[in-house]
């Protein structure tokens, strides 16, 4: 029996989710029909309620729909509730959609299991306070990190984050103070700056062996690498990583929700990295 799933977003042509889920299904001998659909913000509810949407058993949700999906789903997992973000929808037998968020668990899995990053007592710096940051903070705060500093140009999203998460280890500061913070062990770029042009940010203070993790990949990530290479304190020991590992790990957790099987991820991550230069 064919299992029908999809990813929706706007834009969507760049999505690697079909490639990833089809690779998982092939390895696990699951007959899968997984398609990408461009769905505008105005079409979100109508698509999921349409006959086409109701034929799907599960839907991955990408920008700009993650927060809308959290408000719209009939039920939410604890992670989605905490993040106020949904990237995985499952159609239950009663016709109601259940929302989950696998972004944070996917990020932590890539950091710890694939990259060997030690999060215990680490100082984290996250640049950006949009939906992507909401999606990862819950999982980061579930680890034994010492502190996570969230930096953003506008103060109002930072106020919302502080009020929502209320964890004493999380602090927020304006972008103009980025270069005056104590050294961080893990730098996470959670902005979309690299998709629209070159980075033009103050240089963060990073430890000599810092991990610089970019939630983006492709051209956007290459722009981050260029920016970090011009950093006045650039260190050859910095580990600069794109978000392809997180992309695959969060997909594996969505796949498990739908099929009750956790796929192997290393070979798919390696496959995507071989294609990295061609990813827009």
Image (spheres, helix red, strand yellow):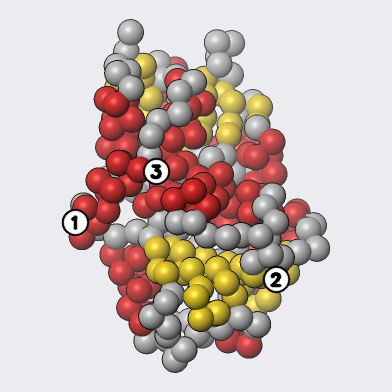
| Tags 2 and 3 touching, CB below 8 Å | no
Identified at 63% across, 49% down, the residue is 139
Dot 3: what SS?
helix
Of 125 and 74, the residue lying toward us: 125
The residue furthest top is: 1
**Distance from Cα at disc 1 to Cα at disc 3:** 17 Å
Dot 1: what SS?
helix
Which quadrant of the figure contains the N terminus?
Answer: top left
Q: Which residue is mark 2?
A: 172
| Tags 2 and 1 touching, CB below 8 Å | no
Which quadrant of the figure contains the C terminus?
Answer: bottom left
Q: Is residue 262 visible?
A: yes
Picture coordinates of residue 24, whole percent (x, y): 33, 30
Q: Which mark is residue 248?
A: 3
**Distance from Cα at disc 2 to Cα at disc 3:** 29 Å
Q: Which residue is mark 1?
A: 278
**Distance from Cα at disc 2 to Cα at disc 1:** 36 Å
Picture coordinates of residue 261, whole percent (x, y): 45, 23
Identified at 35% across, 66% down, the residue is 221
Q: Earlier in the sequence, mark 2 or mark 1?
A: 2
Say few, some or many: other residues with alpha carbon within 10 Å of mark 3 (under 14 / 14 to 19 / 20 or more): many
Looking at the image, is 213 positioned above or below residue 135?
below
Dot 2: what SS?
strand
Select label 2 or label 3 by which is in front: 3
Looking at the image, is 212 positioned above or below residue 256?
below
Of 185 and 80, the residue lying toward us: 185
Q: Is residue 48 visible?
A: no
């Amino acid at each position: 029996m064919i299992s029908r799933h999809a990813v929706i977003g706007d834009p969507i042509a760049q999505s690697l989710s079909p490639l990833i889920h089809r690779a998982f299904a092939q390895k696990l001998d699951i007959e899968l029909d997984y398609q990408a659909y461009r769905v505008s913000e105005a079409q979100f509810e109508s698509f999921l309620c349409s006959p086409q949407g109701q034929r799907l058993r599960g839907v991955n949700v990408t920008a700009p729909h993650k927060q809308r999906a959290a408000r719209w789903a009939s039920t939410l997992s604890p992670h989605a509730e905490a993040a106020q973000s949904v990237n995985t929808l499952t159609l239950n037998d009663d016709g109601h959609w259940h929302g989950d968020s696998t972004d944070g668990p996917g990020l932590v899995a890539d950091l710890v299991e694939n990259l060997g990053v030690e999060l215990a007592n680490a100082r984290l710096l996250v640049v950006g306070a949009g939906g992507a940051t909401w999606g990862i903070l819950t999982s980061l705060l579930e680890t034994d990190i010492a502190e996570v500093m969230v930096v953003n140009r506008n103060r109002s999203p930072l106020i919302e984050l502080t009020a929502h998460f209320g964890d004493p280890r999380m602090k927020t500061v304006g972008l103009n103070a980025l270069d005056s913070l104590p050294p961080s062990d893990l730098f996470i770029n959670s902005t979309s700056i690299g998709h629209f042009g070159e980075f033009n940010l103050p240089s963060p203070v990073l430890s000599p062996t810092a991990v610089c993790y970019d939630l983006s990949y492709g051209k956007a990530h290459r722009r981050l690498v260029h920016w970090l290479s011009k950093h006045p304190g650039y260190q050859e020991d910095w580990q600069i990583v794109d978000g392809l590992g997180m992309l695959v790990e969060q997909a594996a957790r969505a796949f498990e929700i739908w099929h009750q099987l956790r796929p192997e991820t290393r070979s798919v991550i390696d496959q995507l990295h071989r294609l990295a230069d061609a990813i827009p």
